[in-house]
Image (cartoon, rainbow, N blue to C red):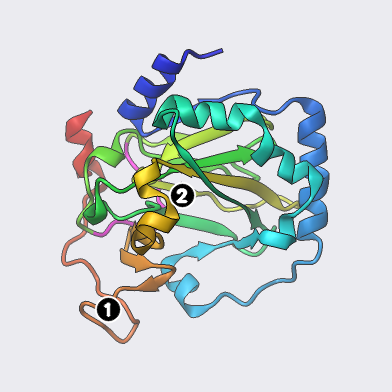
Amino acid sequence: MTSGNTLKSDFERDGFVIVENFLDPSEIEAARADARAAAAVLKPDPHRPDREFWGVLSQRLTGNDIDRPGLNAIAEKPRLAEVARQILGDDCVYGDQSMQVYLPHLGHRQSWHSDTDPDDSPFFYLTMTTYLQDQTRQLGMTRLVPGSHHAPIEKSFPDHDDLPGQAAADVRAGSLCAFHSLTWHSAMENFSDEPRFVVVNVFSCPQFSRDRAGQYYGRMRHARGARRSGRPTFDHPTDQGSYPWPQAYDLAQMPYMANR
């Protein structure tokens, strides 16, 4: 088992850590069966214009839709809170659980983004994703850019392209990825014949819990600009309902690379 000190130092350096064998085979099977049942009611959803614009194409289930024993067991698993405490401290606060579903043959993927906005620093939270299937390029997997939580990105770049220095979480079923909400990440497209399930749990430091810092939740940075709960922030509206950043990066010159 990785020591708490190593886990925390790796997280602070890279902005994410991978915990393999987080779930055992029986837990994986129970969670996967419940994920399939929860997703069985989903129908192809016409992509909303804002999600089309941002390139965030997946379906998110919350609350009663995922209130099933196999999925609840992930949130209730002591090891989940233990990892969060190793990273954030013993007084960290649990937020909520959701599940991202990437349906097959519908172009489901998520473009490059951070879960919070660096303008709100030091506010951040811990995003913890649990994978119920082996992650592959065919099924899709999470891409992250190590160290990108240290350097705010102020210019646009391609929504879905591979980025210099990226790490792909091509991990086995039952693995956990815990990442800083300022770490740039994306979800690759699902080209398989089955839905891809990602269970998401959130923890934060107590001063950044939703009831104390709710004004920051829903603000995030995206490869195309700034977002609030999926919508553009209208500092400089355009016909597309966004404000493009004035310059684009050469992918070989991404700003965080100088810090590596």
- Pick the residue in front: 128 or 73: 73
User: Are circles 1 and 2 on residues that touch, CB within 8 Å?
Assistant: no
* Residue 159 belongs to the span the image colors magenta: yes
- Give residue 100's position: percent from left, percent from top: 61, 54
Q: In this view, does 251 lie to the left or right of 133?
A: left
Q: In this view, does 7 lie above or below 123?
A: above
- Give residue 212's position: percent from left, percent from top: 37, 55
Q: Which of marks 1 and 2 is in front?
A: 1
What secondary structure predominates along the stretch shown in magenta? loop
Q: Is residue 229 above or below residue 163?
A: below
Circle number at residue 234 = 1
* Residue 203 belongs to the span the image colors magenta: no
Q: Is residue 204 left or right of residue 105?
A: left
- Pick the residue in front: 12 or 44: 12
Q: Residue at x 35, y 33 (%)?
A: 146
Q: Residue at x 44, y 38 (%)?
A: 179
Circle number at residue 79 = none
Element type where label 1 sits in the image: loop
- Residue 43 at least partly seen: yes
User: Type of residue at label 1?
Assistant: Phe
Residue beneath disc 2: 186
Which is more N-terminal, label 2 or label 1?
A: 2
Q: Is residue 15 left or right of residue 256?
A: right
Q: In which quarter of the image is residue 213?
A: bottom left
Element type where label 2 sits in the image: strand
- Give residue 115's position: percent from left, percent from top: 40, 52
What's drawn in magenta, residue-wise?
A: 156-164
Q: How far apart are marks 1 and 2 (CA)?
A: 24 Å
